[in-house]
Image (cartoon, rainbow, N blue to C red):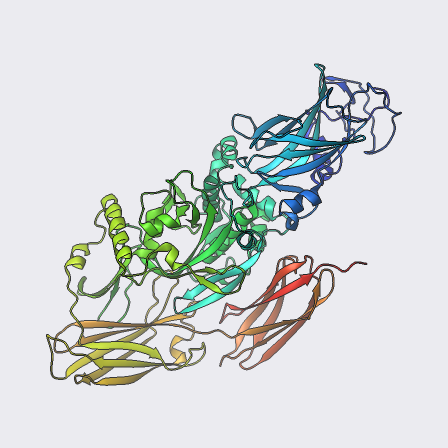
C-alpha cells in the first residue's frame, strides 16, 4: 500500500481503543495512532512488522488512482446537529446522543470518491457485553439508497467528492444504552477492512410515534422530559408545601451514571447479556430503576432512614436536588448515599427516567395508606386519655407519600391501560423478590382492576383503604370511634404543566368519594383482594357489624391564629349539642381529655408533649367555644424536623357512656427567605444574587448553613456557613453567578439549622444566550 494511511482493524487491542475514546466520542476522526502491537494492514490478517505513526488528517499519500482501494480517512459524527435534532443538545455537544426511531447523520471521509456500484459498506452497532443479533444487542446492516422500515438501516447517502453523508436509522424498539459503531469496507468478494467509527448513546424517544413512550404533545414533552427542575409536594393535606427540586438530568456525567445504575442491578450482575437485551422494554427498565434507587437489595443509590438520627449522613430534608446524590453514589463506587425518604427516592428516579427519555413526573399522595396485609383497612388506636398508641402492626397511614408516574404503552396489559403508570422506588414491600413497585396502570387503579400487573393492589390500597379508629383499653379494642371511608388518598398532587401551580390529580386515581362508581369499584377491588389475602384484621367482622350511634354533640378544633414554630399555639374547641332520638331532651355532661403528640412521617406518634382535661355541660342547641393553649415550652425540642403536631381529644358522654374523637393536625410554619437577582441574566455574564433571611422565631437558630443549587446556573453546589442567627436578626448574602446554559432555570436556596431544617426558597431565572462578540 506504500504511503497509505494506517487502517483500524476490528481486533484492535483494548489499549488502542482506549486511546481512541476521546476523539471517537467527540465524533472526530478515526485512524488510530500506532501502538505497540498494532501494525499497518494491507488486507485482513496481514501486516508489516514495522508500524508507522501518522497524524490524523495528514496528507502523506500521492493522489489515488481510480482503482485504488477505498480507505476511511476520518469521520464526523455530527454531534451538535444530531443532538439538536434529537432533543439532547442540553446533554452537550462533544458526544453523540440520539433517540431511537429517528434518523441521525454521519459524514465519512475517504481517500477517494465512494462508488456505490463497487464499494460495499456494512455497519455494525453493538451494545452491552457479548452482543449478539439474537439478543438484539448487535445489528448488522448494509448501506442502501432507501431505508427499510422500522429496522436498523443506513440509507439516503449523498456523495460529495471524497465525502459520504449517510443517514443512520435505529428502530423504535432498539435496546437503549451506549453503543459502538463500526464499518466494514469491501469491494467485490475480496477481503474487507473494518473501522471503528465511534460511540453513541441511544435513548428512548417520546417524540417517535413508534416508541412505547410516545407522548403526542410538545407542551407535555417540554414538561416531563426537558424540564430539569420542579416541585415535590410535602406536608399535610391541609398544609401542602411546594418543595423545589433540581432534577438536573442534563448535567455532565448524569447520563453515564444512569447507565451505571442499570449496570449495577442484580439482574445485570446475574446475567448481563440477558439484562442488556431487555433494555428495549420500558416496563423492564422502569422496574430495574425502581429497585436500584433504593439499596435494600443491592448497592442502590439511596439508603432510607425514617428515624431521627442522620449523623452518619445527610438528613433527607437537606437535599436540594438529585445531581449531588447521583454523583456521590458514582464517585464512591456505588455505595448507597445516606439518607433518603420517599420524596428523595421519587425525585432521583424522576431524574434518571427523564434522562433515559421516559416522560416522568413526581406525584404526592396525602394520607397515604401502607396496607401490607391487603385487607383495605388501616386500624389505629387511642386510649381514653386521647393518646394515639403505638402498634406492632406494619399497616400505617403516612402523612404523605411520594412516588412517580411514567408515561408508556402497556403491551402486556389489555387495551385501555396505557398512559400514566405508577412506580415507587421507596422500599416498602417486595415485588418479584426485590424492593420495587410498579409500573401499575393508573387507569387500572381507578377501575379497581387490581389483578393487572404490577403491584396494582398495593397502590390501590394507598389511595383507597378505609381507616378504622378504635378506643383501646384493658388490652383490647372496646369500641369504634370512627370508620372513615374517604380519609385516605387525599389531594393527590403533581406540578401543573407550564406553571408553578399544583395540580390535583385525585380524579385520575379514583371516582369522587361516596359516589356510586367509587363504591362499586371499591367492592370489586375488595372482593378480588380479600379472596387473595383473607381476614388480616381480627376486628374485621366487628367492623362491618358495628352500628355507629349518632352522636349527641358535634366537636371541632380550630386554630385561633397562624401557628408558627417558636410561639405558643392557641386552639378553640367548638362544641354544639344536637338532637337525637335516643336522647332528645335535657342537658348532657362531657369529660374531654386532650393530648398533643409530635407526628412522625410514617404515621406514628411520639410520646405526649401536652395534656389537658375539660368538663362541659350542654343543653339542646347550646354551643360553646373553649380555648386551649399549647405553650412553646411544651413542644420545644420535642418535634421532628417536619414540625407536625396532632392534637386529639376523647369526649365521653356521661349519660350514654359512649366516646367521641376530635382531631386537629398542625403544621408549624418555618421562617421565609427572599431571593433577588439582576434584571438580565446572560450566559457567561455575572448575575448578581441577593439573599435576605430574617430569623422571625423567638429563639436563636444555631449552626446555620446555606446551600445554593441550580442546573445551568451553578456547577454542583455553593455552600456557606452562617453560624448562629439570634432571634430577630437579618442576614444578607450577595454573590455573583455565571450562568452556563440559556433558557429557563431555577435557583434554589436552602438554609438549615439545628432547630429548623427546611427553610427553602427559589427564584426562576430566564437566561439569555451569550451575546455575539
Q: Does the rendering let one see residue 437?
A: no
Image position of 767 with respect to 455: above or below: below
Residue at image coords 58%, 47%: 330
The N terminus - image quarter: top right
Q: Does the rendering let one see residue 490?
A: yes
Q: Where's residue 114, x and y in %?
A: 76, 26
What residue occupies the far top of the structure in this picture?
A: 189
Image position of 190 with respect to 726: above or below: above
Left/right placement of residue 770 relative to residue 282 reads right
Q: Where's residue 428, x and y in %?
A: 38, 51
- Quarter of the image where one finds residue 403: bottom left
- Quarter of the image where one finds residue 771: bottom right
Left/right placement of residue 605 relative to residue 146 reads left
What residue occupies the far front of the structure in this picture?
A: 146
Q: Nearer the viewer, residue 10 or 140?
A: 140
Q: Where's residue 596, x and y in %?
A: 33, 73
The C terminus - image quarter: bottom right
Left/right placement of residue 445 relative to residue 706 reads left
Image position of 760 with respect to 296: above or below: below
Q: Nearer the viewer, residue 677 or 514?
A: 514
Image position of 45 with respect to 635: above or below: above
What residue occupies the far right of the structure in this picture?
A: 62
Number of numbered discs overlaid on the protein picture: 0
Q: Where's residue 199, x and y in %?
A: 66, 36
Amino acid at each position: 500500500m506504500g504511503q497509505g494511511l494506517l487502517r483500524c482493524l476490528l481486533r484492535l487491542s483494548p489499549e488502542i481503543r482506549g486511546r481512541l475514546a476521546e476523539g471517537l466520542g467527540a465524533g472526530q476522526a478515526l485512524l488510530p495512532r500506532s501502538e505497540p502491537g498494532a501494525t499497518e494492514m494491507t488486507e485482513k490478517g496481514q501486516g508489516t512488522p514495522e508500524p508507522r505513526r501518522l497524524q490524523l488528517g495528514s496528507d502523506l499519500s500521492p493522489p489515488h488512482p481510480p482503482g485504488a482501494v477505498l480507505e476511511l480517512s476520518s469521520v464526523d459524527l455530527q454531534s451538535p446537529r444530531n443532538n439538536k435534532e434529537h432533543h439532547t443538545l442540553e446533554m452537550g455537544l462533544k458526544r453523540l446522543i440520539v433517540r431511537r426511531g429517528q434518523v441521525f447523520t454521519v459524514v465519512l471521509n475517504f481517500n477517494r470518491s465512494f462508488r456505490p456500484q463497487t464499494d460495499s459498506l456494512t455497519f455494525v452497532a453493538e451494545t452491552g457485553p457479548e452482543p449478539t443479533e439474537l439478543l438484539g444487542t448487535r445489528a448488522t446492516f448494509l448501506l442502501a439508497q432507501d431505508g427499510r422500515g422500522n429496522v436498523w438501516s443506513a440509507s439516503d447517502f449523498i456523495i460529495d467528492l471524497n465525502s459520504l453523508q449517510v443517514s443512520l436509522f435505529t428502530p423504535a424498539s432498539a435496546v437503549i444504552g451506549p453503543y459502538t459503531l463500526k464499518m466494514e469496507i469491501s469491494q467485490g468478494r475480496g477481503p474487507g477492512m473494518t473501522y471503528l467509527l465511534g460511540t453513541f448513546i441511544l435513548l428512548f424517544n417520546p417524540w417517535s410515534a413508534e416508541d412505547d413512550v410516545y407522548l403526542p404533545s410538545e407542551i407535555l414533552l417540554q414538561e416531563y422530559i426537558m424540564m430539569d427542575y420542579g416541585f415535590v409536594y410535602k406536608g399535610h393535606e391541609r398544609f401542602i408545601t411546594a418543595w423545589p427540586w433540581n432534577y438536573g438530568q442534563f448535567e455532565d456525567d448524569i447520563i453515564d451514571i444512569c447507565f451505571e445504575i442499570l449496570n449495577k442491578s442484580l439482574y445485570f450482575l446475574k446475567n448481563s447479556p440477558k439484562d442488556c437485551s431487555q433494555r428495549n422494554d420500558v416496563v423492564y427498565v422502569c422496574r430495574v430503576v425502581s429497585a436500584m434507587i433504593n439499596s435494600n437489595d443491592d448497592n442502590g443509590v439511596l439508603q432510607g432512614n425514617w428515624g431521627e438520627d442522620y449523623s452518619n449522613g445527610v438528613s433527607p430534608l437537606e437535599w436540594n436536588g438529585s445531581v449531588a446524590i447521583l454523583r456521590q453514589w458514582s464517585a464512591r463506587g456505588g455505595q448507597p448515599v445516606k439518607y433518603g425518604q420517599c420524596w428523595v427516592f421519587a425525585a432521583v428516579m424522576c431524574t434518571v427516567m427523564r434522562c433515559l427519555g421516559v416522560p416522568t413526573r413526581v406525584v404526592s399522595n396525602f394520607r397515604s395508606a401502607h396496607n401490607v396485609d391487603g385487607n383495605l383497612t388501616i386500624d389505629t388506636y387511642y386510649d381514653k386519655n386521647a393518646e394515639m398508641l403505638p402498634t406492632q402492626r406494619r399497616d400505617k397511614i403516612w402523612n404523605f407519600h411520594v412516588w412517580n408516574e411514567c408515561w408508556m404503552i402497556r403491551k402486556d396489559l389489555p387495551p385501555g391501560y396505557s398512559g400514566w403508570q405508577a412506580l415507587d422506588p421507596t422500599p416498602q414491600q417486595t415485588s418479584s423478590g426485590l424492593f420495587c413497585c410498579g409500573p401499575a396502570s393508573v387507569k387500572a387503579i381507578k377501575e379497581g382492576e387490581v389483578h393487572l400487573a404490577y403491584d396494582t393492589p398495593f397502590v390501590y390500597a394507598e389511595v383507597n383503604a378505609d381507616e378504622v379508629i378504635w378506643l383501646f383499653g384493658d388490652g383490647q379494642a372496646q369500641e369504634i370511634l370512627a370508620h372513615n371511608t374517604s380519609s385516605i388518598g387525599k389531594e393527590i398532587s403533581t406540578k401543573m404543566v407550564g406553571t408553578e401551580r399544583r395540580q390535583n390529580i385525585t380524579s385520575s386515581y379514583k371516582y369522587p368519594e361516596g359516589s356510586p362508581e367509587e363504591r362499586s369499584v371499591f367492592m370489586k377491588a375488595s372482593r378480588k383482594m380479600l379472596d387473595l389475602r383473607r381476614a388480616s384484621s381480627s376486628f374485621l367482622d366487628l367492623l362491618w357489624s358495628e352500628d355507629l350511634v349518632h352522636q349527641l354533640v358535634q366537636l371541632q378544633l380550630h386554630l385561633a391564629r397562624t401557628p408558627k414554630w417558636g410561639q405558643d399555639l392557641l386552639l378553640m374547641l367548638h362544641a354544639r349539642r344536637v338532637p337525637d332520638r335516643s336522647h332528645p331532651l335535657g342537658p348532657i355532661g362531657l369529660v374531654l381529655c386532650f393530648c398533643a403528640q409530635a407526628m412522625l412521617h410514617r404515621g406514628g406518634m411520639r410520646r405526649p408533649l401536652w395534656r389537658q382535661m375539660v368538663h362541659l355541660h350542654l343543653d339542646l342547641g347550646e354551643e360553646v367555644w373553649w380555648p386551649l393553649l399549647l405553650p412553646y415550652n411544651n413542644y420545644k425540642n420535642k418535634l421532628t424536623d417536619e414540625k407536625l403536631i396532632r392534637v386529639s381529644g376523647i369526649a365521653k358522654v356521661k349519660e350514654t357512656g359512649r366516646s367521641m374523637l376530635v382531631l386537629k393536625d398542625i403544621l408549624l410554619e418555618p421562617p421565609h427567605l427572599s431571593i433577588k437577582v439582576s434584571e438580565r441574566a446572560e450566559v457567561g455574564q455575572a448575575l448578581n444574587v441577593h439573599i435576605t433571611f430574617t430569623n422571625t422565631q423567638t429563639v436563636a437558630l444555631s449552626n446555620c448553613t446555606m446551600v445554593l443549587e441550580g442546573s445551568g446556573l451553578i456547577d454542583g453546589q455553593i455552600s456557606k456557613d452562617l453560624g448562629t442567627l439570634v432571634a430577630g436578626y437579618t442576614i444578607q448574602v450577595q454573590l455573583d453567578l455565571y450562568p452556563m446554559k440559556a433558557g429557563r432555570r431555577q435557583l434554589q436556596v436552602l438554609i438549615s439549622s439545628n432547630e429548623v431544617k427546611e427553610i427553602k426558597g427559589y427564584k426562576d431565572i430566564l437566561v439569555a444566550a451569550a451575546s455575539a462578540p
